[in-house]
Amino acid sequence: MAIYLDTEDPMTSPELEVTATAPERWNGFEVPIATAPAFRAFIAAWQEMDPNGTWEPRGVSVSADGRLVYIDGDGTEDSWEVYGVTAGGESTYALDGWTWVDA
């Protein structure tokens, strides 16, 4: 399943591969559930498409307490707590706070 940032034409922008979407919404927007590697790949795809933007794949990390942390090229930080675990034991995160849509 894929989900996109709410842009003028979401289908022309990179997609985030998600395991599901959360039943709750954030300000009316979808809340994707994804792993750290999927989120990092999404950020890398955006950086490739928009090399002059603030997308920074090296800014994606998992902190010692398990939170997914993203620091963009301008130093703005977002972080998300562990939401669940995949069947393979990989942590998932509910990526609220961004404007996601299921295009």
Image: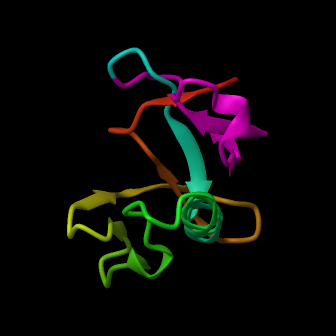
- Residue 14, x across and y down, in percent: 67, 48
- Where 103 falls versus 14 (above or below)? above
Part of the protein shown in magenta: 1-26
Is residue 17 visible to the viewer in this orientation of the structure?
no
Q: Residue at x 32, y 67 (%)?
A: 72
- Residue 95, x across and y down, in percent: 44, 46
- Most foreground residue, 59 or 82: 59
Res 3 → quadrant: top right
- Where 103 falls versus 20 (above or below)? above
Q: Please say which color scheme the image uses.
A: rainbow
Is residue 55 visible to the viewer in this orientation of the structure?
yes
- Residue 10, x across and y down, in percent: 64, 30
- Most foreground residue, 73 or 34: 73
Q: Quadrant of the C terminus?
A: top right
Q: Residue at x 51, y 28 (%)?
A: 6
Q: Indicate whether residue 52 is drawn in magenta.
A: no
Q: Residue at x 55, y 24 (%)?
A: 8
